[in-house]
Amino acid sequence: MARSIVLQNRVLLLNGSTWEPLSVITVQRAINLLLAGKAIAVEQTGQFLNTVRTKFEVPSVIALRSYVNVPRRKSHWSRKGVLVRDNYTCIYCGVKMGALGKGIVLSKRDFTIDHIIPRSKGGKDTWSNTACACSKCNHRKSNRLHNVAGMRLLWEPKTPRTSYLVIALGSGPEIWKQYVEI
């Protein structure tokens, strides 16, 4: 029916009217939703799915025609999830992955998880108590509260919406980023 390369692609499914990301589905499921008139294509991949009689353009993003009420699911904390939520950006100095730090380009390995309230002072592994920090800032803050170390938070760490985090961790295509806000 089609090349295996096309069938391995994933499609971002958006909720109707709000265009909130719901999930990542297979190309086959996406085309079935489009053919049934339950969804519309928002972004295309430029690839085609060939059948005996028809040629279908493979979507990258589709949206349901009507809104579906989805109850919020609890998101589970993880170190990788915190780094992705913060887009590998230091909460203290704002340096980002790929930026130059003292003449070198920072990579994922240059970022760590910092506990806003250190574990030794009762801080927990929670979304609101952890943030991405560059190794320089994390070392400077050490085992102290940020205000004691003379540092300030550039934003308040918050619990991400589960659907956004799952999609972000799945490392989807670049085109999805405009529909997925962490």
Image (spheres, helix red, strand yellow):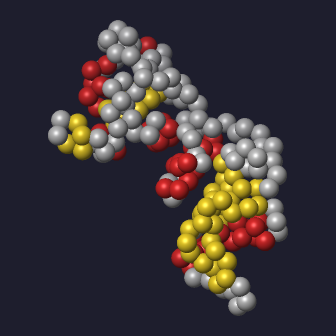
Q: Is residue 1 visible?
A: yes
Q: Is residue 113 visible?
A: no
- Asked if residue 97 lies left or right of residue 6, the reply is left
Residue 107 in the image, given as x and y percentages of width and height: 30, 45
Residue at 66% x, 59% y is 42
Residue 51 in the image, given as x and y percentages of width and height: 69, 86
Residue 71 in the image, given as x and y percentages of width and height: 77, 39
Q: Is residue 113 above or below residue 23?
A: above
Q: How many numbered marks appear?
A: 0
Q: Quadrant of the C terminus?
A: top right
Residue at 73% x, 44% y is 18
Q: In the orientation shown, which residue stands out farthest toward the top?
A: 148
- Asked if residue 51 lies left or right of residue 102, the reply is right
Q: Is residue 68 above or below residue 1?
A: above
Q: Is residue 169 above or below residue 129?
A: below
> Camera-side residue: 89 or 143?
89
Residue 103 sits in quarter: top left
Q: In the orientation shown, which residue stands out farthest toward the left?
A: 103
Q: Quadrant of the N terminus?
A: bottom right
Residue 180 in the image, given as x and y percentages of width and height: 58, 46
Residue 49 sits in quarter: bottom right
Residue at 61% x, 61% y is 43
Q: Is residue 171 above or below residue 49?
A: above
Residue at 77% x, 65% y is 33
- Asked if residue 22 lies left or right of residue 87, the reply is right
